[in-house]
Amino acid sequence: MKLTEIADNPGSRPARIRVGRGIGSGKGKTSGKGVKGQKARSGVAIKGFEGGQMPIHRRLPKGGFKNLFRTAYLPVNLGKIQAAVDAGRIAAGATVNAATLAETGVLGLRRGFPVRLLADGEIKVALTLEVDAASEAAVAAVEAAGGKVAIIPKRVVARKEGKKAERRKTQIAKREAREAARA
């Protein structure tokens, strides 16, 4: 084989269609775009356009609400914790928190989220569970098995204040200092 004999497979590079080259070519005059109008022009994007009629996405009412400030909990069921105890990953009578659940594979890889204990499944051993939230049924099931559920107080993340708030604080401090000097 020689370099001059190397070629693509037949049909792998189809020839470009040359439009606007007379009526005999089959792609002449309108170049395959039909006849006049908006769609015959290039760069037309009329998704959702209904010919001037009010589009359906504007006729239908909006609905729903998404709370931007909600707390997203990772759910942990009692059945999963009992399965980890049965497998020997969690010792009976141990104190179990989010870090323990993550290490034993009950929570998976998503750390840092608050944990909510749910009552799906049953628990047979006494454990002390430290979670961010728990359903009443889950607390009752753990206490019935001789365990205890400790709810961790909600962590408050300090919000960073902007320059305007800082400037306002300095203004208030200066005013209070002036008033104290006068008195």
Image (spheres, rainbow, N blue to C red):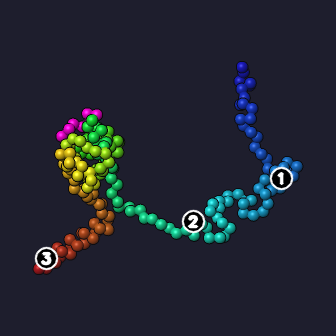
Which is nearer the eye, 12 or 105? 105
For disc 2, the neighbor class at 10 Å (few under 14, some 14 to 19, many from 20) is few
Numbered circle sitting on residue 181: 3
Which residue is depicted at the point 85% across and 48% down?
A: 25
Secondary structure at badge 1 equals loop
Asked whether residue 88 is drawn in magenta, I would say yes
Amino acid residing under circle 3? Ala
Q: Residue 138: percent from the left, percent from the top?
A: 26, 51
Asked whether residue 11 is drawn in magenta, I would say no
Query: Which callout, 1 or 2, points at the residue further toward the start of the chain?
Result: 1
Q: Furthest residue to the bottom?
A: 183
Q: Residue 112: percent from the left, percent from the top?
A: 31, 48
Quadrant (top left/top right/bottom left/bottom right) for the C terminus: bottom left
Residue on which the image places disc 2: 57
Which residue is depicted at the point 25% across and 69% down?
A: 169
Decide if residue 128 is in sight here.
no
Q: Report how many numbered discs are placed on residues in the image.
A: 3
Tell me the CA gap for discs 2 and 3: 64 Å
Amino acid residing under circle 1? Gly
Q: Furthest residue to the top?
A: 1
Q: Furthest residue to the left?
A: 183
Secondary structure at badge 3 equals helix
Tell me the CA gap for discs 3 and 1: 91 Å
Numbered circle sitting on residue 28: 1
Q: Nearer the viewer, mark 1 or mark 2?
A: 2
Q: Nearer the viewer, mark 2 or mark 3?
A: 2
Decide if residue 96 is in sight here.
yes
Amino acid residing under circle 2? His
For disc 1, the neighbor class at 10 Å (few under 14, some 14 to 19, many from 20) is some
For disc 3, the neighbor class at 10 Å (few under 14, some 14 to 19, many from 20) is few
Which residue is depicted at the point 25% across and 72% down?
A: 171
